[in-house]
Image (cartoon, helix red, strand yellow):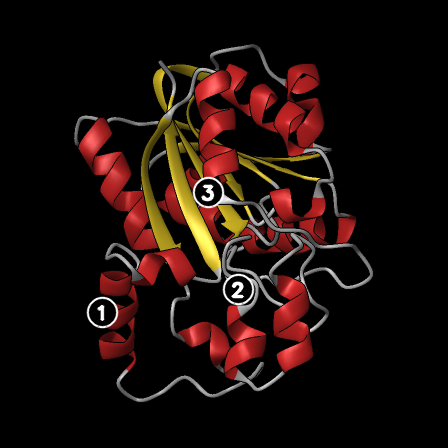
């Protein structure tokens, strides 16, 4: 996902431009810190106090220049209008958040308003068109059958990809279908520009499985599959990139 995001940023903005980045639901701050280290001005918004504490601890260990480029706000991603003026950011990230929001359209509309003209909106969502894939491959036939007619994630789907942050247990988790998010993005003035699959093959790995020795080959396979049909369509997660018109 990081490689996909960097590809979109490089294609859209001049090399060396210091971007204004908002990371909504930043979790432990993996992407936010990475972009601050790259020279961008980053604001992280997170409502989970534990995650905020982890992110602030990580930031405290960074050099002064990076600390000055990043600020962390404890708050709800649905209240961006309370914290920021419209058009305040060049890039808005919302990774692994929509799965916890019962009605995502108002949140997405608020995120689009935060973008300057030509700004990039990067979303990472559970793939509602592939929920039967993992239970089917594991031989859970009843689970697979039930997954065809729902966007509610099954209990064993316990991880997302916001820098490795686990799904927050105790909260309902839902998925989004590509056609629905595409329609929403068009309606809020940030139409879909590119999309990728994330965790096409590796979603079947057991939680806590060791990283293989040939991890670069694994990443190359996942990166290729994530941009190639039909593989990206059955990925566990979808990385959707909209552009503010």
Q: On the picture, is 221 further left or further right than 52?
A: left
How far from the left and from the top, in percent, is residue 96?
57, 50
Secondary structure under tag 3 reads: helix
Quadrant occupied by the C terminus: top left
Q: Residue furthest right?
A: 170
Cβ atoms under marks 2 and 1 closer than 8 Å: no
Residue 46's disc number:
none
CA gap, disc 2 to disc 1?
18 Å
Residue 220's disc number:
1
Which residue is pictured at 26% across the width and 85% down the height? 214
Secondary structure under tag 1 reads: helix
Observer-nearest of 167 and 82: 167
As drawn, 33 above or below 121? below
Q: Which residue is mark 3?
A: 178
How far from the left and from the top, in percent, is residue 168?
72, 60
* Mark nearer the viewer, 2 or 1: 1
- Within 10 Å of disc 3 (Cα), the crowding (few <14, some 14-19, many 20+) is some
Observer-nearest of 38 and 185: 185
CA gap, disc 3 to disc 2?
23 Å
- Within 10 Å of disc 2 (Cα), the crowding (few <14, some 14-19, many 20+) is few
Q: Which residue is mark 2?
A: 164
Sequence-earlier tag: 2 or 1: 2
* Mark nearer the viewer, 3 or 1: 3
As drawn, 202 above or below 43? below
- Within 10 Å of disc 1 (Cα), the crowding (few <14, some 14-19, many 20+) is few
CA gap, disc 3 to disc 1?
24 Å
Which residue is pictured at 47% across the width and 12% down the height? 87
Using the rendered view, name the quadrant where residue 144 is placed.
Answer: bottom right
């Amino acid at each position: 996902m990081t490689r996909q995001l960097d590809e979109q940023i490089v294609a859209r903005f001049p090399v060396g431009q210091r971007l204004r980045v908002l990371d909504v639901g930043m979790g432990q701050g993996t992407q936010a810190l990475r972009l601050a280290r790259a020279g961008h001005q980053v604001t992280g918004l997170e409502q989970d106090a534990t995650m905020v504490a982890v992110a602030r601890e990580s930031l405290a260990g960074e050099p002064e220049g990076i600390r000055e480029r990043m600020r962390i706000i404890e708050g709800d991603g649905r209240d961006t209008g309370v914290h920021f003026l419209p058009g305040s950011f060049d890039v808005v990230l919302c990774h692994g958040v929509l799965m916890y929001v019962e009605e995502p359209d108002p949140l997405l509309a608020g995120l689009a308003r935060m973008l300057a003209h030509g700004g990039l909106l990067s979303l990472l969502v559970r793939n509602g068109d592939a929920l039967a894939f993992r239970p089917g491959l594991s031989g859970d036939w009843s689970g697979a059958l039930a997954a065809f007619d729902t966007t509610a994630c099954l209990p064993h789907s316990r991880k997302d990809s916001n820098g490795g942050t686990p799904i927050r247990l105790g909260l309902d988790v839902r998925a989004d279908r590509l056609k629905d998010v595409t329609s929403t993005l068009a309606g809020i003035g940030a139409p879909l520009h590119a999309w990728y699959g994330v965790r096409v093959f590796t979603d079947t790995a057991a939680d806590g499985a060791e990283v293989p020795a040939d991890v670069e080959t694994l990443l190359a396979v996942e990166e290729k599959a994530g941009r190639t049909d039909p593989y990206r369509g059955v990925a566990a997660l979808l990385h959707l990139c909209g552009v503010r018109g």
